[in-house]
Amino acid sequence: MRVLYVSQYFVSADQPGGVRHWQHTQALRRAGHDVHVVTSYVQHKERTIPERYQGRKIVRDHEDGLTIWRTYATPGYGRDLRSRLSNYTSFATWAALAMLRVRRPDVIVASSPALPAATAAALVARLRKVPFVFEARDLWSDSAKAMGLITNPRVLGLARRMERFCYRSASHVIALTEGIRDGIVDEGVNPGKVSLITNGIDLDVIGDAEPEPAAAPVPADAVVAMYVGAHGTYSSLETVLDAAELLRDRDDIRVVLVGGGDRKAGLVDDARRRGLANVAFVDPVPKRDVPRWLARAQVCLLPYQALEFFGGALPNKAFDYLAAGRPLLVAAPEGELTRLVRDVDAGVCVPPEDPQAMAAAVRALADDPARRAGMGERGRDAAHRRFDRRALAARFVRIVEGVGRV
Protein backbone atom coordinates (compact mmCIF):
# COMPACT_ATOMS: atom_id res chain seq x y z
CA MET A 1 0.00 0.00 0.00
CA ARG A 2 0.93 3.61 -0.42
CA VAL A 3 0.37 5.38 2.92
CA LEU A 4 0.30 9.18 3.26
CA TYR A 5 1.07 10.23 6.84
CA VAL A 6 0.48 13.85 7.88
CA SER A 7 1.91 15.41 11.04
CA GLN A 8 3.09 18.97 11.52
CA TYR A 9 5.65 17.79 14.10
CA PHE A 10 7.64 14.77 12.87
CA VAL A 11 10.75 13.89 14.86
CA SER A 12 13.27 11.12 14.18
CA ALA A 13 15.30 9.29 16.82
CA ASP A 14 18.27 11.55 16.07
CA GLN A 15 16.33 14.68 17.08
CA PRO A 16 14.93 15.99 20.37
CA GLY A 17 11.28 15.24 21.06
CA GLY A 18 8.78 12.40 20.91
CA VAL A 19 9.25 9.83 18.15
CA ARG A 20 5.77 8.24 18.06
CA HIS A 21 5.20 9.27 14.43
CA TRP A 22 8.64 8.07 13.36
CA GLN A 23 8.10 4.70 15.05
CA HIS A 24 4.70 4.24 13.41
CA THR A 25 5.94 5.15 9.94
CA GLN A 26 8.96 2.88 10.35
CA ALA A 27 6.61 0.04 11.34
CA LEU A 28 4.59 0.67 8.18
CA ARG A 29 7.78 0.67 6.11
CA ARG A 30 8.98 -2.59 7.65
CA ALA A 31 5.59 -4.11 6.82
CA GLY A 32 6.35 -3.43 3.17
CA HIS A 33 4.38 -0.25 2.59
CA ASP A 34 5.44 2.82 0.61
CA VAL A 35 5.24 5.63 3.17
CA HIS A 36 5.08 9.35 2.36
CA VAL A 37 5.25 11.81 5.27
CA VAL A 38 4.05 15.42 5.03
CA THR A 39 5.47 17.62 7.80
CA SER A 40 6.80 21.12 8.43
CA TYR A 41 10.45 22.07 8.14
CA VAL A 42 10.09 24.77 10.82
CA GLN A 43 12.10 23.79 13.91
CA HIS A 44 9.33 23.60 16.50
CA LYS A 45 11.46 24.25 19.58
CA GLU A 46 13.27 27.26 18.10
CA ARG A 47 10.42 28.46 15.80
CA THR A 48 12.98 28.96 13.01
CA ILE A 49 13.47 27.84 9.40
CA PRO A 50 16.75 25.97 8.76
CA GLU A 51 18.97 27.63 6.19
CA ARG A 52 18.66 24.82 3.63
CA TYR A 53 14.90 25.44 3.38
CA GLN A 54 15.04 29.23 3.11
CA GLY A 55 12.98 30.46 0.14
CA ARG A 56 11.46 27.04 -0.58
CA LYS A 57 7.85 26.09 0.11
CA ILE A 58 7.83 22.32 -0.46
CA VAL A 59 10.93 20.11 -0.31
CA ARG A 60 11.00 16.39 -1.03
CA ASP A 61 13.52 14.34 0.96
CA HIS A 62 14.28 10.64 1.42
CA GLU A 63 15.23 9.54 4.93
CA ASP A 64 15.15 6.23 6.81
CA GLY A 65 13.31 4.55 3.93
CA LEU A 66 10.58 7.22 3.93
CA THR A 67 9.68 9.89 1.39
CA ILE A 68 9.31 13.07 3.42
CA TRP A 69 7.63 16.20 2.08
CA ARG A 70 8.63 19.18 4.22
CA THR A 71 6.66 22.37 3.80
CA TYR A 72 6.62 25.98 4.82
CA ALA A 73 4.78 27.28 7.89
CA THR A 74 5.11 30.70 9.44
CA PRO A 75 8.03 30.73 11.92
CA GLY A 76 8.49 32.81 15.05
CA TYR A 77 5.13 31.95 16.58
CA GLY A 78 4.48 32.34 20.29
CA ARG A 79 1.63 31.64 22.68
CA ASP A 80 -0.61 34.34 21.22
CA LEU A 81 -3.57 33.18 19.15
CA ARG A 82 -2.75 35.20 16.04
CA SER A 83 0.75 33.79 15.48
CA ARG A 84 -0.32 30.26 16.41
CA LEU A 85 -3.23 30.30 13.96
CA SER A 86 -0.94 31.69 11.28
CA ASN A 87 1.47 28.82 11.85
CA TYR A 88 -1.27 26.17 11.86
CA THR A 89 -3.15 27.45 8.83
CA SER A 90 -0.06 28.13 6.72
CA PHE A 91 1.15 24.60 7.33
CA ALA A 92 -2.30 23.17 6.55
CA THR A 93 -2.33 25.07 3.24
CA TRP A 94 1.11 23.99 2.07
CA ALA A 95 0.61 20.48 3.45
CA ALA A 96 -2.55 20.12 1.35
CA LEU A 97 -0.58 21.11 -1.76
CA ALA A 98 2.14 18.59 -0.86
CA MET A 99 -0.48 15.86 -0.32
CA LEU A 100 -1.80 16.46 -3.82
CA ARG A 101 1.70 15.91 -5.25
CA VAL A 102 1.80 12.36 -3.89
CA ARG A 103 0.51 9.74 -6.29
CA ARG A 104 -2.94 8.63 -5.16
CA PRO A 105 -2.44 6.85 -1.81
CA ASP A 106 -4.39 3.86 -0.52
CA VAL A 107 -4.96 5.56 2.84
CA ILE A 108 -4.27 8.92 4.46
CA VAL A 109 -3.33 9.09 8.15
CA ALA A 110 -3.25 12.39 10.04
CA SER A 111 -2.36 13.18 13.63
CA SER A 112 -3.36 16.08 15.84
CA PRO A 113 -2.02 18.43 16.92
CA ALA A 114 -2.29 20.44 14.76
CA LEU A 115 -5.98 20.22 14.00
CA PRO A 116 -6.06 22.41 10.83
CA ALA A 117 -3.59 20.06 9.14
CA ALA A 118 -5.66 17.03 10.12
CA THR A 119 -8.75 18.75 8.72
CA ALA A 120 -6.89 19.44 5.47
CA ALA A 121 -5.89 15.76 5.31
CA ALA A 122 -9.51 14.70 5.79
CA LEU A 123 -10.56 17.02 2.95
CA VAL A 124 -7.84 15.68 0.64
CA ALA A 125 -8.93 12.12 1.49
CA ARG A 126 -12.48 12.99 0.44
CA LEU A 127 -11.27 14.68 -2.73
CA ARG A 128 -9.13 11.70 -3.72
CA LYS A 129 -11.73 9.18 -2.53
CA VAL A 130 -9.40 7.30 -0.21
CA PRO A 131 -10.00 6.22 3.42
CA PHE A 132 -8.84 8.43 6.26
CA VAL A 133 -7.43 7.48 9.68
CA PHE A 134 -7.38 10.17 12.37
CA GLU A 135 -5.05 9.96 15.35
CA ALA A 136 -6.28 12.18 18.20
CA ARG A 137 -3.34 12.96 20.46
CA ASP A 138 -5.47 15.39 22.43
CA LEU A 139 -8.97 16.84 22.53
CA TRP A 140 -7.69 19.93 20.78
CA SER A 141 -10.47 22.41 21.46
CA ASP A 142 -10.77 21.31 25.10
CA SER A 143 -7.03 21.60 25.68
CA ALA A 144 -6.84 25.03 24.02
CA LYS A 145 -9.70 26.25 26.21
CA ALA A 146 -8.30 24.71 29.40
CA MET A 147 -4.89 26.29 28.82
CA GLY A 148 -6.38 29.67 28.02
CA LEU A 149 -4.73 29.60 24.58
CA ILE A 150 -8.07 30.27 22.90
CA THR A 151 -10.77 32.30 24.63
CA ASN A 152 -12.69 33.55 21.61
CA PRO A 153 -15.93 31.49 21.50
CA ARG A 154 -16.11 31.72 17.71
CA VAL A 155 -12.63 30.28 17.31
CA LEU A 156 -13.38 27.56 19.86
CA GLY A 157 -16.57 26.73 18.00
CA LEU A 158 -14.66 26.45 14.74
CA ALA A 159 -12.11 24.15 16.40
CA ARG A 160 -14.90 21.97 17.71
CA ARG A 161 -16.43 21.71 14.23
CA MET A 162 -13.08 20.75 12.73
CA GLU A 163 -12.66 18.00 15.34
CA ARG A 164 -16.12 16.63 14.62
CA PHE A 165 -15.44 16.77 10.87
CA CYS A 166 -12.28 14.70 11.37
CA TYR A 167 -14.17 12.16 13.51
CA ARG A 168 -16.98 11.83 10.95
CA SER A 169 -14.59 11.62 8.01
CA ALA A 170 -12.40 8.94 9.58
CA SER A 171 -12.80 5.27 8.84
CA HIS A 172 -11.00 4.73 12.13
CA VAL A 173 -9.94 6.98 15.02
CA ILE A 174 -6.91 6.28 17.21
CA ALA A 175 -6.88 7.80 20.71
CA LEU A 176 -3.72 8.40 22.74
CA THR A 177 -5.31 8.01 26.19
CA GLU A 178 -8.43 6.59 27.78
CA GLY A 179 -9.69 10.11 28.48
CA ILE A 180 -9.30 11.09 24.84
CA ARG A 181 -11.07 7.91 23.73
CA ASP A 182 -13.96 8.60 26.10
CA GLY A 183 -14.17 12.21 24.90
CA ILE A 184 -14.37 11.06 21.27
CA VAL A 185 -17.12 8.55 22.06
CA ASP A 186 -18.99 11.27 23.94
CA GLU A 187 -19.06 13.20 20.66
CA GLY A 188 -21.23 10.42 19.23
CA VAL A 189 -18.48 8.46 17.46
CA ASN A 190 -19.16 4.71 17.24
CA PRO A 191 -16.93 3.09 19.93
CA GLY A 192 -16.23 0.28 17.48
CA LYS A 193 -14.20 2.59 15.27
CA VAL A 194 -12.12 4.08 18.09
CA SER A 195 -8.94 2.31 19.25
CA LEU A 196 -6.62 3.14 22.12
CA ILE A 197 -2.89 3.17 21.32
CA THR A 198 -0.92 4.83 24.12
CA ASN A 199 2.64 6.04 24.03
CA GLY A 200 5.22 3.45 24.99
CA ILE A 201 8.88 2.61 25.41
CA ASP A 202 11.17 2.57 22.39
CA LEU A 203 13.32 -0.53 22.83
CA ASP A 204 14.63 -0.15 19.27
CA VAL A 205 16.01 3.22 20.32
CA ILE A 206 17.00 2.77 23.96
CA GLY A 207 18.08 -0.90 23.90
CA ASP A 208 18.03 -3.23 26.89
CA ALA A 209 21.39 -2.51 28.53
CA GLU A 210 21.88 0.15 31.20
CA PRO A 211 23.63 3.00 29.35
CA GLU A 212 26.66 4.95 30.52
CA PRO A 213 25.32 7.97 32.41
CA ALA A 214 25.68 11.36 30.76
CA ALA A 215 28.08 13.88 32.24
CA ALA A 216 25.58 16.15 33.95
CA PRO A 217 26.87 19.50 35.30
CA VAL A 218 26.46 18.41 38.93
CA PRO A 219 28.70 16.82 41.59
CA ALA A 220 29.42 13.17 40.85
CA ASP A 221 27.87 12.01 44.15
CA ALA A 222 24.74 14.20 43.96
CA VAL A 223 21.23 12.75 44.04
CA VAL A 224 19.64 14.14 40.87
CA ALA A 225 15.97 14.98 40.39
CA MET A 226 15.64 15.32 36.62
CA TYR A 227 13.10 16.58 34.10
CA VAL A 228 13.58 15.76 30.41
CA GLY A 229 11.21 17.38 27.94
CA ALA A 230 9.75 20.57 26.57
CA HIS A 231 10.02 23.70 28.68
CA GLY A 232 6.65 24.90 27.46
CA THR A 233 3.04 25.47 28.27
CA TYR A 234 1.95 22.24 29.89
CA SER A 235 4.69 21.53 32.43
CA SER A 236 4.76 23.59 35.62
CA LEU A 237 8.51 23.96 35.81
CA GLU A 238 8.07 27.06 37.96
CA THR A 239 6.94 24.63 40.68
CA VAL A 240 10.20 22.71 40.22
CA LEU A 241 12.20 25.91 40.79
CA ASP A 242 10.11 26.68 43.88
CA ALA A 243 10.84 23.18 45.20
CA ALA A 244 14.54 23.59 44.44
CA GLU A 245 14.54 26.77 46.51
CA LEU A 246 13.17 24.74 49.44
CA LEU A 247 15.96 22.20 48.93
CA ARG A 248 18.83 24.68 49.24
CA ASP A 249 19.83 23.15 52.56
CA ARG A 250 20.54 19.78 50.90
CA ASP A 251 23.98 19.99 49.28
CA ASP A 252 23.59 16.37 48.16
CA ILE A 253 20.52 17.05 45.97
CA ARG A 254 20.55 18.69 42.53
CA VAL A 255 17.77 19.48 40.05
CA VAL A 256 18.57 19.05 36.34
CA LEU A 257 16.22 20.28 33.59
CA VAL A 258 16.99 18.90 30.12
CA GLY A 259 15.26 20.31 27.04
CA GLY A 260 14.16 23.49 25.34
CA GLY A 261 11.04 25.49 24.64
CA ASP A 262 9.48 28.91 24.63
CA ARG A 263 9.56 29.24 28.42
CA LYS A 264 13.12 28.07 28.99
CA ALA A 265 14.77 31.50 28.80
CA GLY A 266 12.41 32.82 31.47
CA LEU A 267 13.09 29.82 33.70
CA VAL A 268 16.85 30.25 33.35
CA ASP A 269 16.54 33.93 34.23
CA ASP A 270 14.33 33.12 37.22
CA ALA A 271 16.77 30.53 38.56
CA ARG A 272 19.65 32.97 38.14
CA ARG A 273 17.73 35.77 39.85
CA ARG A 274 16.99 33.52 42.82
CA GLY A 275 20.56 32.25 42.98
CA LEU A 276 19.52 28.61 42.62
CA ALA A 277 22.96 27.04 42.39
CA ASN A 278 21.33 23.62 42.91
CA VAL A 279 19.55 23.83 39.51
CA ALA A 280 21.27 23.03 36.20
CA PHE A 281 19.82 23.54 32.71
CA VAL A 282 20.85 21.34 29.78
CA ASP A 283 20.14 21.93 26.09
CA PRO A 284 17.77 19.57 24.23
CA VAL A 285 19.22 16.15 23.41
CA PRO A 286 18.29 13.67 20.65
CA LYS A 287 15.85 10.91 21.60
CA ARG A 288 18.66 8.35 21.33
CA ASP A 289 20.58 10.17 24.08
CA VAL A 290 17.70 10.45 26.55
CA PRO A 291 18.50 7.09 28.25
CA ARG A 292 22.03 8.29 29.06
CA TRP A 293 20.65 11.36 30.80
CA LEU A 294 18.03 9.40 32.70
CA ALA A 295 20.75 6.96 33.80
CA ARG A 296 22.23 9.90 35.73
CA ALA A 297 18.93 10.60 37.50
CA GLN A 298 17.76 9.14 40.79
CA VAL A 299 14.28 10.72 40.57
CA CYS A 300 12.34 11.70 37.42
CA LEU A 301 10.01 14.69 37.57
CA LEU A 302 6.60 15.06 35.90
CA PRO A 303 5.17 18.43 36.96
CA TYR A 304 1.82 19.61 35.59
CA GLN A 305 -0.39 22.59 36.17
CA ALA A 306 -3.31 22.31 38.58
CA LEU A 307 -5.94 22.03 35.85
CA GLU A 308 -8.43 19.17 35.84
CA PHE A 309 -7.78 18.73 32.13
CA PHE A 310 -4.30 17.35 32.85
CA GLY A 311 -5.81 14.41 34.72
CA GLY A 312 -6.07 12.82 31.27
CA ALA A 313 -2.38 13.25 30.44
CA LEU A 314 -0.21 10.22 29.76
CA PRO A 315 2.91 11.79 28.24
CA ASN A 316 5.67 10.14 26.29
CA LYS A 317 8.27 11.15 28.89
CA ALA A 318 6.49 9.03 31.53
CA PHE A 319 7.35 5.94 29.51
CA ASP A 320 10.95 7.08 29.03
CA TYR A 321 11.19 7.39 32.82
CA LEU A 322 9.66 3.96 33.40
CA ALA A 323 11.97 2.33 30.86
CA ALA A 324 14.97 3.91 32.59
CA GLY A 325 14.10 2.13 35.81
CA ARG A 326 13.83 5.34 37.78
CA PRO A 327 11.05 6.33 40.20
CA LEU A 328 8.60 8.95 38.96
CA LEU A 329 7.66 11.97 41.03
CA VAL A 330 4.32 12.97 39.54
CA ALA A 331 2.81 16.35 40.41
CA ALA A 332 -0.46 16.20 38.50
CA PRO A 333 -4.24 16.13 38.98
CA GLU A 334 -5.67 12.72 39.74
CA GLY A 335 -6.15 10.74 36.54
CA GLU A 336 -4.54 8.25 34.17
CA LEU A 337 -0.95 9.10 35.01
CA THR A 338 -1.39 8.98 38.79
CA ARG A 339 -3.37 5.71 38.47
CA LEU A 340 -0.60 4.11 36.43
CA VAL A 341 2.13 5.15 38.87
CA ARG A 342 0.15 3.95 41.90
CA ASP A 343 -1.01 0.70 40.27
CA VAL A 344 2.56 -0.23 39.44
CA ASP A 345 4.03 1.37 42.59
CA ALA A 346 6.60 3.05 40.36
CA GLY A 347 6.84 6.38 42.12
CA VAL A 348 5.25 9.05 44.25
CA CYS A 349 2.28 11.29 43.41
CA VAL A 350 1.85 14.73 44.96
CA PRO A 351 -0.64 17.55 44.27
CA PRO A 352 0.21 19.76 41.28
CA GLU A 353 1.77 23.18 41.80
CA ASP A 354 2.65 22.33 45.42
CA PRO A 355 6.40 22.97 45.83
CA GLN A 356 6.39 21.97 49.51
CA ALA A 357 4.98 18.53 48.65
CA MET A 358 7.40 18.14 45.76
CA ALA A 359 10.41 19.11 47.88
CA ALA A 360 9.34 16.74 50.67
CA ALA A 361 8.99 13.87 48.17
CA VAL A 362 12.43 14.56 46.70
CA ARG A 363 13.93 14.55 50.22
CA ALA A 364 12.23 11.27 51.11
CA LEU A 365 13.36 9.54 47.91
CA ALA A 366 16.88 10.91 48.20
CA ASP A 367 17.15 9.39 51.67
CA ASP A 368 15.82 5.93 50.68
CA PRO A 369 17.86 4.36 47.84
CA ALA A 370 16.30 0.93 48.43
CA ARG A 371 12.81 2.35 47.91
CA ARG A 372 13.98 4.13 44.76
CA ALA A 373 15.45 0.94 43.37
CA GLY A 374 12.28 -1.06 44.02
CA MET A 375 10.06 1.54 42.37
CA GLY A 376 12.39 1.74 39.39
CA GLU A 377 12.43 -2.01 38.84
CA ARG A 378 8.65 -2.30 39.08
CA GLY A 379 8.23 0.56 36.62
CA ARG A 380 10.67 -0.90 34.13
CA ASP A 381 9.03 -4.33 34.32
CA ALA A 382 5.57 -2.86 33.71
CA ALA A 383 6.86 -0.78 30.80
CA HIS A 384 8.34 -3.85 29.11
CA ARG A 385 5.25 -5.95 29.66
CA ARG A 386 2.54 -3.43 28.81
CA PHE A 387 3.99 -0.60 26.77
CA ASP A 388 6.50 -1.95 24.25
CA ARG A 389 6.23 0.51 21.35
CA ARG A 390 6.92 -2.28 18.87
CA ALA A 391 3.72 -4.07 19.88
CA LEU A 392 1.80 -0.78 19.92
CA ALA A 393 3.13 0.13 16.46
CA ALA A 394 2.15 -3.30 15.16
CA ARG A 395 -1.41 -2.61 16.33
CA PHE A 396 -1.29 0.71 14.49
CA VAL A 397 -0.14 -1.04 11.29
CA ARG A 398 -3.00 -3.55 11.51
CA ILE A 399 -5.53 -0.71 11.78
CA VAL A 400 -4.08 1.15 8.79
CA GLU A 401 -3.88 -2.03 6.72
CA GLY A 402 -7.45 -2.93 7.62
CA VAL A 403 -8.71 0.47 6.52
CA GLY A 404 -6.56 0.74 3.39
CA ARG A 405 -7.47 -2.68 2.02
CA VAL A 406 -11.22 -2.40 2.40
Image (spheres, rainbow, N blue to C red):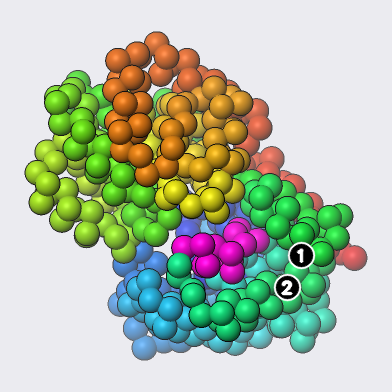
Q: Is residue 268 above or below residue 212?
A: below
Q: Residue furthest right?
A: 406
Q: What number of labels is visible?
A: 2
Q: Which quadrant would the N terminus be assigned to in this image?
A: bottom right
The residue tagged 2 is: 164
The image quadrant that residue 93 belongs to is bottom right
Where residue 91 sits: x, y (%)? 51, 80
Task: Using residue 110 as the reference point, say whether residue 230 is left or right of it.
Answer: left
Q: Is residue 217 visible?
A: no
Q: How many other residues sit within 10 Å of disc 2, few (<14), some (14-19) or many (≥20)?
A: some
Q: Nearer the viewer, residue 273 or 385?
A: 273
Q: What amino acid is found at the position of numbered circle 1 in the picture? A: Glu
Q: Label for residue 323?
A: none
Task: Answer whether labels 1 and 2 touch (C-beta < 8 Å).
Answer: yes
- SS under mark 2: helix
The residue tagged 1 is: 187
Where residue 304 sits: x, y (%)? 43, 47
Task: Using residue 365 as the reference point, say whether residue 242 is left or right of it.
Answer: left
The image quadrant that residue 180 belongs to is bottom right
Q: Is residue 25 visible?
A: yes
- SS under mark 1: loop
Q: What amino acid is found at the position of numbered circle 2 in the picture? A: Arg
Q: How many other residues sit within 10 Å of disc 1, few (<14), some (14-19) or many (≥20)?
A: few
Where residue 373 sits: x, y (%)? 42, 16
Q: Provide the residue span drawn in magenta.
A: 136-147
Q: Which quadrant would the C terminus be assigned to in this image?
A: bottom right
The image quadrant that residue 191 belongs to is bottom right
Q: Earlier in the sequence, mark 1 or mark 2?
A: 2
Q: Residue at x 9, y 44 (%)?
A: 275
Q: Residue at x 41, y 18 (%)?
A: 372
